[in-house]
Image (cartoon, grey):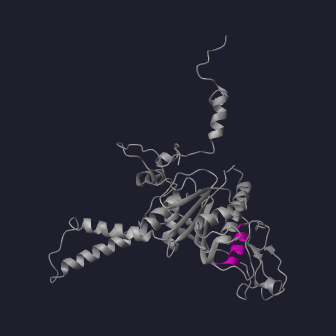
């Protein structure tokens, strides 16, 4: 979470530093959780492309430390207020203590809940870049597109029962998240393609470790052919939705695909040795019945592109008759009373600038800075060089 002139007045950037988050992207996961309740009954999570660790930090504070944020925190405070109000109205109850007097017992009770909530939670974070350690999070420096990452991840998930000969974990994970994105070039078609390949790499790894009914959340760039990705995801997940958190700038094409209810087709076996790609059709039940599967597209008169991934017959061409054409629902996450990520807010006069919570440990631009320094500084100029006659 580096500094820039644009970020200085970004409300979420400043709020992240004030609340101790490593990056402003933490609010994206929190707002997704408010909408889809991602962390319910979740004890085993894999965070892909995790650096600098803001999403892993959210997982650590919610699943291990038992903290609550957003709507859940507000509902808990409302419940405590109602409980205190009802206690004061009960005449038969003993003398009611003030909230200040009961703060210490409540704090001890919360601490007990926090220590209990972290039992049995396993969080594994994977990224090519180094990441500072977090409480209860196992960090791996590996490439999610390489098959050698699978045994490393399986060993981190089950260090006691890991079997090197097995290609799957004995205890599958409940949730796989990925906030990875390539270094954008400004060429939208190229950026969308590279992002889709990164998402396919995350999906292939998620297929190897997700349990039936598991969840998968990943960043996407919305392009003209993104509906093909939604249609293929719908084959292995019961529910596929696209969400745009309010903390994500509206001027950005990024969004997040939220997949719930993992249900792979019968006989399907995931492997990074033969990964699924953007041009690969995920096998479904029609293939097991011997029916031919062929993808077809057509553009309607109103300009909408329709994609059919089902068998070639008239009945399957209809969505209501069991066809696989799919348009994922789009949802906007985050309360409308929250900050606008695209707005520029005026800073107070007495504002003190805070340093980032987690500076980059090995930023991707470090090599570029070293090369510029060797070249004599900015634009190849050497500081202190005397003017030539």
Say whether residue 63 is visible.
Answer: yes
Say whether residue 223 is visible.
Answer: no
Instruction: Count up the numbered dots.
Output: 0
Which residue appears at 19% of the width and 77% of the height? 88
Q: Is residue 134 left or right of residue 177?
A: left
Towards the viewer: 5 or 371: 371
| Residue 351, picture quadrant | top left
| Residue 151, picture quadrant | bottom right
Quarter of the image with the C terminus in it: top right
Which residue appears at 73% of the width and 79% of the height? 325
Question: Any magenta on residue 232?
Answer: yes
Question: Any magenta on residue 71?
Answer: no
Measured from the top left, where is residue 109 in percent x and y?
31, 70
Q: Is residue 31 left or right of residue 180?
A: left
Q: Is residue 275 left or right of residue 37?
A: right
Q: Is residue 98 above or below residue 388?
A: below
Towards the viewer: 194 or 373: 373
Q: Is residue 139 above or below residue 290?
A: above
Measured from the top left, where is residue 335 in percent x and y?
46, 67
Measured from the top left, where is residue 384 in percent x and y?
58, 19
Towards the viewer: 62 or 304: 62
Q: Which residues are magenta?
A: 226-237
Q: Is residue 31 above or below residue 376?
A: below
**Residue that extends furthest to the top in the rendered view of this protein:** 389
Dominant SS in magenta: helix
Measured from the top left, where is residue 63 in percent x and y?
47, 68
Towards the viewer: 340 or 40: 40
């Amino acid at each position: 979470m580096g500094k820039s002139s644009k970020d200085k007045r970004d409300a979420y950037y400043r709020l992240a530093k004030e609340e101790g988050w490593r990056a402003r992207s933490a609010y994206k996961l929190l707002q997704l959780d408010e909408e889809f309740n991602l962390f319910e009954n979740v004890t085993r999570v894999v965070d892909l492309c995790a650096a600098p660790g803001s999403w892993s930090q959210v997982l650590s504070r919610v699943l291990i430390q038992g903290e609550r944020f957003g709507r859940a925190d507000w509902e808990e405070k409302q419940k405590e207020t109602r409980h205190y109000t009802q206690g004061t109205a009960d005449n038969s109850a003993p003398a009611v203590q003030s909230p200040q007097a009961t703060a210490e017992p409540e704090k001890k009770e919360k601490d007990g809940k926090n220590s209990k909530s972290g039992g049995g939670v396993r969080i594994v974070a994977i990224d090519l870049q180094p990441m500072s350690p977090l409480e209860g999070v196992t960090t791996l420096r590996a490439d999610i597109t390489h098959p050698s990452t699978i045994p490393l991840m399986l060993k981190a998930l089950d260090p006691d029962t890991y079997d090197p000969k097995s290609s799957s974990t004995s205890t599958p994970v409940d949730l796989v998240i990925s906030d990875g994105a390539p270094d954008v070039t400004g060429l939208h078609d190229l950026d969308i393609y590279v992002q889709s390949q990164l998402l396919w790499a995350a999906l292939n790894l998620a297929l190897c470790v997700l349990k039936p009914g598991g969840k998968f959340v990943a960043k996407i760039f919305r392009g003209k052919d993104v509906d093909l990705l939604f249609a293929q995801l719908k084959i292995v997940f019961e529910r596929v939705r696209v969400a745009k958190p309010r903390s994500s700038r509206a001027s950005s094409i990024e969004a997040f695909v939220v997949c719930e209810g993992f249900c792979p087709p019968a006989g399907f076996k995931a492997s990074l040795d033969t990964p699924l790609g953007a041009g690969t059709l995920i096998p479904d039940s029609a293939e097991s019945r011997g029916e031919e599967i062929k993808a077809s597209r057509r553009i309607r008169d109103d300009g909408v592109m329709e994609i059919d991934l089902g068998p070639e017959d008239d009945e399957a061409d209809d969505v209501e008759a069991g066809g696989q054409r799919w348009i994922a629902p789009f949802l906007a996450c985050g309360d409308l009373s929250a900050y606008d990520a695209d707005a520029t807010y005026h800073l107070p006069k007495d504002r003190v600038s805070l340093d980032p919570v987690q500076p980059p440990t090995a930023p991707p631009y470090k090599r570029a800075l070293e090369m510029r320094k060797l070249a004599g500084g900015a634009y190849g100029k050497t500081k202190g060089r005397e003017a030539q006659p």
